[in-house]
């Protein structure tokens, strides 16, 4: 770990879990009676969540490998449950998703019905460069079905996306400025207060056509 002066062997998530506290039962169970079902092993949770988050974002294994610095073959083994990653590898994967290590590994506890994404939460910042800033507004564990973003496009900024999974639709509301949306052969210009929905299972694009920043709220809903 960073800052440690003593050399230690690599720790795996499986080994860490064995030294931890008691496992919690799986939340949200509808089974009656007082019986308790054991939680899914942490390494199994990790492989399932990596696969679900990657598919929800429409990324290939190659894209995740490029973003995380973890090889494609290692990612494939992790998703299949045939490899148990070190903490360092898991941390790099979490960073690629804009999540903390605990968010990637831990299942939601269900302790409260209110989940908050704070304005200053650095983990919620999905992308930021000269022209685009994207902040995730939906909790990571919901992203199997829906993604909710705050999108800021600087003047000249353009968000170009490849086709998502079949049946995916995007819903865009312009909060400030003006933007042009392209979906397939369709094009429409939007002003502040306008909303549009369109197919996102084909190539699509959002472009700032104003002189100032364009701020919008973007929702992706995946088809069942």
Image: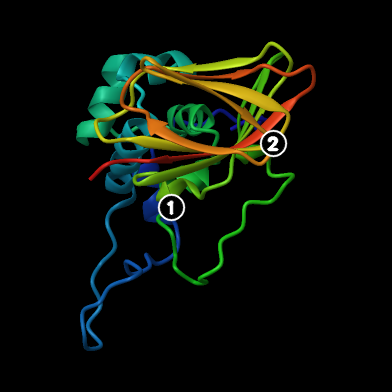
Query: Label 2 belongs to which residue?
Result: 192
Q: Position of residue 128 (x, y in %)?
A: 66, 23
User: What is the crowding at mark 1: few (fewer than 14 residues within 10 Å), some, or many (at least 20)?
Assistant: few
Q: Earlier in the sequence, mark 1 or mark 2?
A: 1
43 sits to left or right of 120: left
**Under tag 1, what secondary structure?**
loop
Q: Secondary structure at mark 2?
A: loop
In this picture, residue 48 sits left or right of residue 218 = left
Residue 221 in the image: state x and y as whole percent: 38, 42
User: Residue 119's x, y, as percent?
Assistant: 72, 47
Q: Badge 2 local density, few (<14 within 10 Å), some, or many (20+)?
A: some
The answer to which of 215 and 48 lies nearer the viewer is 215
Q: Nearer the viewer, mark 1 or mark 2?
A: 2
Q: Which mark is residue 56?
A: none
Q: Nearer the viewer, residue 102 or 200?
A: 200
Out of 19 and 214, give the one closest to the viewer: 214
User: Which residue shows up at 21% across the image and 79% down it?
Assistant: 31
Any part of residue 70 in sight: no
Q: Which mark is residue 106?
A: 1
State which quadrant residue 33 falls in: bottom left
- The alpha-carbon separation of the residues under discs 1 and 2 comes to 39 Å
The x and y percentages for residue 60 are 32, 20
What residue do we see at 68% from left, 44% from top? 121
Q: Residue at x 32, y 66 (%)?
A: 26
Q: What colour scheme governs how the chains and residues are painted in the rendered image of this protein?
A: rainbow
Quarter in which the N terminus is drawn: top right
Left or right: 83 with respect to 67?
Answer: left
| Circles 1, 2 touching at the beta carbon (< 8 Å) | no
Q: From the image, which quarter does the C terminus lie in?
A: top left
The quarter of the displayed image where residue 63 is located: top left
């Amino acid at each position: 770990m960073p800052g440690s002066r003593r050399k230690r062997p690599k720790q795996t998530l499986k080994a860490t879990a064995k030294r931890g506290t008691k496992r919690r039962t799986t939340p949200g169970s509808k089974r009656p009676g007082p019986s308790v079902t054991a939680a899914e092993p942490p390494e199994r949770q990790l492989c399932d969540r990596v696969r679900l988050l990657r598919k929800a974002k429409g990324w290939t294994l190659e894209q995740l490998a490029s973003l995380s610095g973890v090889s494609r073959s290692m990612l494939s083994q992790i998703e299949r449950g045939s490899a148990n990653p070190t903490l360092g590898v898991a941390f790099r994967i979490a960073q690629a998703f804009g999540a903390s290590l605990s968010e990637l590994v831990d299942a939601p506890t269900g302790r409260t019905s209110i989940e908050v994404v704070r304005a200053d939460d650095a983990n919620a910042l999905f992308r930021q460069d000269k022209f685009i800033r994207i902040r995730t507004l939906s909790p990571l564990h919901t992203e199997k079905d829906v993604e909710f973003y705050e999108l800021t496009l600087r003047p000249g900024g353009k968000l170009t996306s490849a086709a998502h999974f079949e049946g995916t639709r995007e819903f865009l509301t312009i909060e400030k400025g003006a933007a042009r949306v392209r979906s397939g052969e369709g094009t429409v210009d939007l002003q502040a207060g306008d909303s549009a929905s369109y197919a996102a299972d084909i190539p699509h694009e959002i472009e700032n056509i104003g002189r100032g920043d364009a701020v919008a709220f973007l929702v992706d809903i995946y088809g069942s």
